[in-house]
Image (spheres, rainbow, N blue to C red):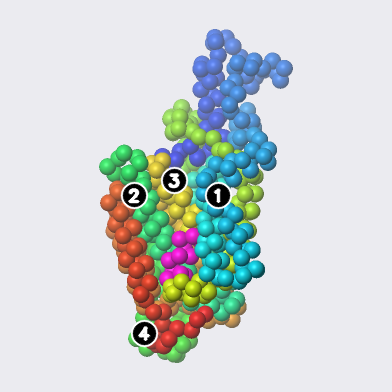
Amino acid sequence: MASTAAAGSDSRRLLPGRQNSSHQMDRINGNSFKSTNEVPPFSLGADEFDDDTLIASDPPSHRIGGFERNAGPVSRGAFHSLKVVLLTSKLNLLIPCGFVAIVVNYTTGNHGWVFPLTLLGIIPLAERMGFATEQLAFFTGPTVGGLLNATFGNATELIISIHALRSGKLRVVQQSLLGSILSNLLLVLGCAFFSGGVTCGKTEQKFSKSDAVVSSGLLLMAVLGLLPPTVLHYTHSEVHSGKSGLALSRFSSCVMLVAYACYIYFELSSSRRREESNELNQGRGVNVGADNEEAPDISKWEAIAWLAILTVWISVLSDYLVDAIDGASQAWNIPVAFISVILLPIVGNAAEHASAVMFAMKDKLDLSLGVAIGSSTQMSMFGIPFCVVIGWMMGQPMDLNFHLFETASLLMTVLVVAFLLQDGTSNCLKGLMLFLCYLIVAASFYVHSDQDPDGNSPSQN
């Protein structure tokens, strides 16, 4: 998760209000006064302020005991927010493709065109969601910001999965969730490592090794949850055929959800202690990186509003995207499994992809790992077991038996990533290796015939 950034790679996100208070104390101590006989500004009356004693660029905020806390920019109005969100990215030129896809769907019903147009329409929306989440992280701190980024990045996949569960399309659910994990671990993280190594001018970039080890352990725990139901079925060693594996899947899913909840509690508690420590250091005059401070472009509530709008619009387009999968598969002569595991997650993970690459190019690799690995951890330890429990409530036999080919692909992916993260450094070569591994996985699913565990022809669910 994004707690890995708290060690110093993104200190500007730590308690922005207290950073502003530290700046004001510096100015009080002699940077903004002409003589030592002047009275500090917060001891003056409201009509005695000197315009030259305060720097006007510091925005107003809630005050506690004369100090600023959680200071943020003054809202510049809806027009400024629209300009920042809609006119600052060239990818936004693709937004009309979503509207065109809806029109084509109702006028011609040609899914061969609806599918690519919807893909193109979702890409800029997902990128803007990453931007809005980054803006919100200015006000929440790095850990909560990373959690929000992973959550909103995975919202599309979870909504699609629940919709597919209601329709009984269990294989679509399994393949889309698996594809999201593979995409984040290999494609997103690989591109982040490579772009960071190219643009930062460093031989190696460093990140928190301890946090990477914890994330790798959680991913391996998720694989452990998937392996037993699959092995039980393929070895025909279930006590009650067709029932033991399902019962084990539901039990393991509950355990995984508890483990993920404990992990989130631990991360938030650790982040709170680190923030209190940084706050104390600032009070003592210790430099914790305030010189690198950046200001958000939109206010907190504007960021929340944009996240809500973008989530709803992405969800609407995702419905058209899923409905067009079968038609696009026939029109393009591409296996449905390839579309579900490879193409859909690339679009669904566009927010994580853009954010991870952007942070890596700014030499904030801890945040890149928090986004890519955090999203994979959330999908494997929360998304998959959550869908199993929801399917249980719906009466659907959703289990953790992802079939042998898919489970083996996930196991090898987690092992490769865990080995590359163990030394706490990254470079262009590691990024290229992860990207090439993703190409191998993609080619494998292109030639893979999706079959049930008994080797029968797949049912087109």
Quickly name the residue at label 1: 93
Magenta region includes residue 401? no
Quickly name the residue at label 3: 358
Quickly name the residue at label 2: 194
Residue neighbourhood size for the residue with mark 1, other residues' Cα within 10 Å, grouped as few (<14), some (14–19), many (≥20): few
- Residue 320 horizontal/vertical position (percent): 59, 67
Q: Nearer the viewer, mark 2 or mark 4?
A: 2
Identify which amino acid the numbered label 4 is placed on: Tyr
Up the image or down, 116 lies above or below 233; here it is above
Residue neighbourhood size for the residue with mark 3, other residues' Cα within 10 Å, grouped as few (<14), some (14–19), many (≥20): many
The residue at the point 30 percent across, 40 percent down is 202
- Residue furthest front in the image: 108
Helix, strand or loop at label 2? It is helix
Helix, strand or loop at label 1? It is helix
Residue 259: tell me if it is visible: no
Residue neighbourhood size for the residue with mark 4, other residues' Cα within 10 Å, grouped as few (<14), some (14–19), many (≥20): some
The residue at the point 51 percent across, 16 percent down is 30
Marked residue nearer the N-terminal end (2 or 4): 2
Up the image or down, 368 lies above or below 60; here it is below
Span highlighted in magenta in the image: 337-348
Asked if marks 2 and 1 touch (Cβ < 8 Å), the reply is: no
Identify which amino acid the numbered label 2 is placed on: Phe
Distance from Cα at disc 2 to Cα at disc 1 = 26 Å
